[in-house]
Image (tube, rainbow, N blue to C red):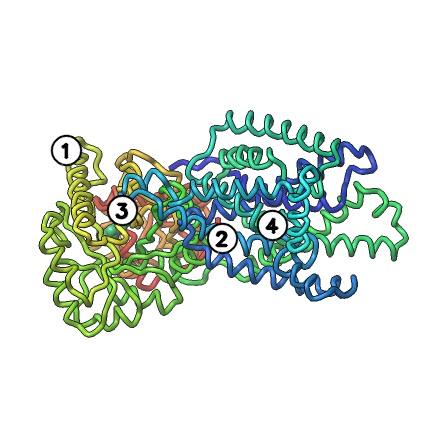
């Protein structure tokens, strides 16, 4: 789990693309060379808006478009805000007729650059519909679904390509329609209604789908670079040729543009790691506000009598608009980071947990990227999210990472999440007393059926609840035996259970020995055989899932709807054993306490309960404000554990107390009361990894983490 320097290429290209859009609207090079300006603003910068559409498709495909309603709503809100922002300019420009207003609101955008938003609003549901339409023709069966990725994508792409071709003739190929008068008048009639063919139907649909397709397959670095340069050259030639013929009505759609975009996007994906909240947040605002900035720059230049410099000189004009737009867009960011820093003084608690929200989001993204487009991340947040704070973790995952499925161990954990505003699926993995099924119903929790008797008892309750069937494929913990089709059939016959999923759990997927791998393979075979038999018997399994963290690390991609990931989400392995597919995850939790006081002992003096420590030399001990009641194992000192103080390791000594512990700081200078000690995590370049601690205590990180916390507050930090 090494960390390399990350470069979030997709996020930074957003900002670049927003600046390209400014270029399109300010023609920076026109004073120097009209050919160069033509190339920049009519050819090269035209990658900007298709790039935004592709990003939308790329991110939606991560969860099989389940986030589509959410993205649509957000886009609609943004459009509403943008319309009000430009209302003063619309009013200033003078009135328009009702048909004009309708055309602008629903198709071309109420201000010239805003067309992107209504286009997205149209294209999102349209893309979904196309995929559904073509998915119907899909062959049934899991292999096929797995290989095909997003169902219906290929067919939808073909349809969208045809639409794009048709759109070309209303855009840069418009001149050619003159050869066939019927076609010309057809296009003219269409264009009088929709304004431009660049828009949702003819343009956005294709690029959103291309973005989605690139999640499944993109090109290597070499192919991407060569492909991009070659297609850009061809695109430039195409544009020059069309202009020499005077064919374009507009310059948004070229034959080579989609080809060029596929290679460009592939290339960015090669260099994309991590995310930049700054580039992400500012790029959209830059895009949104730059026409206002054009007005402001012109106005200010007029007032100051600097028009020759700031308006007539197109390059300075472009720079001024860009600097103003980026500066204004960055204001909320600067404000937030200032206020954030001020609002977060270092914790005053005696001991606390730190939850690195960036690491958590990074891990969720790494895992989602690693899983196939068909397989969504089900975040396992049982046991207070392995000691990280379930509500905090689930909120971050829901809000920032697009996670919409969660798993908990029991009903109370599920209810706590719902009360904290967590939507989507929440699966209770453990046994629930059937008498509590009204709670399952009331809080819309999905219950695991642990065996046939449990199914029967749940079904006799008044409430109809959602369940997932656990199949026992060899672990012999929970589940109906995977081979017992009769039992499964009887459970399906129980009307008051709505079976929305079937799953199994692997018990030795963390081991890579040949015997372990063979056992896991047997489990998988038993699980999929049961699913096949069920499907053939006409029993719908719904969402199937079998991988937990080690299933993700050690198995190839599975044809499932979910992967239930716990420990990997928190950025650590259970132990130090190697895994087949290591992922670049980052630990999320740090654990810190304070130095309460310092003691100096002479040789032979003793300290702590049972006088368990005897000083062998003049010794300085620090008393730390954390103990076994905070969740630490009582045998920690005997295990050879250390803490970090000023970036140096100090060994634990004596007996661990309920609320305190002793560490030997003789070899560390300048330790003073109030200093922060790190039990897990990084301090001044040194790190105590929880896997190391788990190994010392002969346990796994899962146990250490999940026991933490009964009275340790959680502080969210961003690293
Ligand atoms: C806890 C649990 C998981 C998560 O396991 P990790 O190894 O932490 O990813 C998945 N499935 C079931 C049934 C579990 O009980």
Provide the residue designation for mark 2: 126
Residue closer to the observer: 129 or 282: 129
Label 3, label 2: how many angstroms apart (C-alpha)? 35 Å
Q: Position of residue 689 (x, y in %)?
A: 35, 43
Q: Which residue is mark 4?
A: 199
The x and y percentages for residue 708 are: 30, 57
Residue drawn at the location 24% of the way across and 47% of the way down: 546
Residue at the image point whose x is 44% and y is 37% from the top:
3
Secondary-structure class at tag 3: loop
| Vertical relation: 245 (above or below) 455 | above
Q: Which residue is mark 1?
A: 515
> Callout 1 environment at 10 Å: few (<14), some (14 to 19), or many (20+)?
few
The residue under the point 79% across, 53% down is 297
> What SS does tag 1 mark?
helix
| Residue named by callout 3 | 548
Residue 423, image x, y percentages: 38, 63
Task: Between residue 545 and residue 609, name the one nearer to us.
Answer: 545
Q: Is mark 2 within 8 Å of ligand 1?
A: no
In front: mark 4 or mark 1? 4
């Amino acid at each position: 789990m090494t960390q390399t320097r990350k470069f979030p290429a997709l996020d930074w290209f957003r900002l670049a693309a927003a600046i390209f859009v400014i270029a399109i609207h300010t023609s920076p090079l026109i004073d120097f060379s009209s050919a160069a300006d033509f190339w920049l603003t009519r050819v090269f910068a035209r990658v900007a808006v298709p790039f935004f559409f592709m990003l939308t498709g790329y991110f939606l495909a991560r969860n099989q478009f389940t986030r589509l309603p959410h993205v649509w709503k957000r886009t609609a809100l943004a459009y509403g805000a943008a319309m009000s922002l430009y209302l003063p300019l619309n009013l200033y420009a003078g009135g328009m007729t009702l048909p004009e207003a309708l055309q602008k609101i629903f198709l071309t955008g109420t201000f010239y650059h805003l067309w992107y938003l209504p286009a997205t609003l149209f294209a999102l549901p349209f893309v979904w519909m196309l995929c559904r339409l073509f998915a119907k023709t899909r062959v049934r069966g899991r292999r096929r679904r797995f290989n095909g990725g997003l169902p219906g994508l290929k067919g939808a792409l073909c349809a969208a390509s045809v639409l794009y071709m048709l759109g070309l003739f209303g855009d840069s190929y418009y001149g050619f329609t003159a050869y066939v008068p019927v076609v010309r008048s057809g296009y003219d009639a269409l264009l009088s209604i929709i304004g431009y063919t660049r828009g949702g139907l003819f343009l956005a649909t294709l690029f959103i789908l291309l973005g989605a397709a690139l999640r499944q397959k993109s090109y290597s670095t070499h192919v991407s670079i060569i492909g991009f340069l070659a297609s850009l050259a061809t695109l430039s030639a195409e544009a020059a040729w069309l202009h020499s013929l005077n064919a374009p009505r507009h310059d948004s759609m070229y034959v080579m543009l989609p080809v060029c975009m596929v290679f460009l996007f592939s290339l960015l994906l090669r260099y994309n790691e991590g995310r930049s909240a700054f580039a992400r947040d500012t790029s959209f605002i830059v895009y949104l506000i730059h026409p206002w900035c054009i007005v402001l720059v012109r106005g200010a230049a007029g007032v100051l009598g600097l028009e020759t410099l700031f308006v007539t000189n197109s390059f300075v004009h472009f720079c001024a608009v860009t600097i103003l737009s980026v500066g204004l867009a960055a204001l909320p960011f600067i404000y937030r980071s200032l206020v954030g820093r001020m609002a977060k003084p270092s914790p005053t608690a005696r001991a606390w947990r730190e939850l690195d929200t960036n690491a958590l989001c990074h891990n969720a993204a790494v895992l989602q990227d690693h899983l196939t487009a068909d397989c969504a991340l089900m975040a396992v947040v049982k046991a207070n999210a392995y000691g990280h704070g379930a509500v905090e973790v689930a909120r971050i995952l829901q809000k920032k990472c697009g996670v919409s499925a969660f798993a908990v161990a029991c009903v109370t954990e599920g209810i706590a999440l719902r009360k904290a505003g967590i939507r989507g699926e929440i699966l209770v993995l453990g046994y629930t007393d059937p008498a509590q099924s009204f709670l399952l119903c009331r809080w819309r929790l999905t219950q695991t059926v642990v065996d046939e008797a449990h199914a029967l008892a749940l079904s006799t309750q008044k409430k109809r609840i959602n369940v997932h069937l656990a199949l026992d494929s060899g672990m012999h913990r929970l589940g109906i035996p995977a081979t017992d089709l009769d039992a499964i059939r009887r459970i399906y016959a129980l009307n008051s259970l709505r079976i929305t999923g079937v799953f199994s759990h692997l018990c030795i997927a963390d081991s890579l020995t040949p015997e372990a791998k063979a056992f896991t393979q047997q489990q998988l075979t038993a699980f999929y055989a049961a699913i096949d038999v069920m499907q053939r018997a006409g029993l719908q399994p719904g969402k199937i899932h079998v991988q937990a963290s080690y299933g993700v690390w050690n198995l190839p991609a599975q044809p499932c709807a979910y992967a239930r990931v716990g420990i990997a989400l928190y950025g650590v392995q259970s132990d130090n054993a190697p895994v087949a597919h290591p992922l670049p995850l980052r630990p999320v939790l740090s654990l810190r306490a304070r130095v309460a006081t310092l003691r100096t002992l002479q040789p032979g003096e003793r300290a702590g309960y049972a006088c368990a420590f005897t000083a062998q030399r003049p010794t300085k001990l620090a008393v730390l404000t954390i103990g076994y009641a905070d969740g630490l194992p009582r045998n920690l000192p005997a295990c050879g554990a250390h803490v970090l103080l000023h970036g140096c390791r100090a060994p634990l000594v004596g007996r661990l107390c309920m609320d305190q512990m002793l560490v030997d700081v003789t070899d560390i200078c300048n330790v003073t009361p109030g200093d922060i000690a790190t039990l897990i995590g990084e301090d001044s370049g040194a790190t105590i990894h929880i896997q190391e601690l788990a190994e010392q205590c002969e346990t796994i990180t899962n146990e250490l983490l999940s026991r933490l916390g009964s009275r340790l507050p959680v502080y969210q930090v961003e690293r």
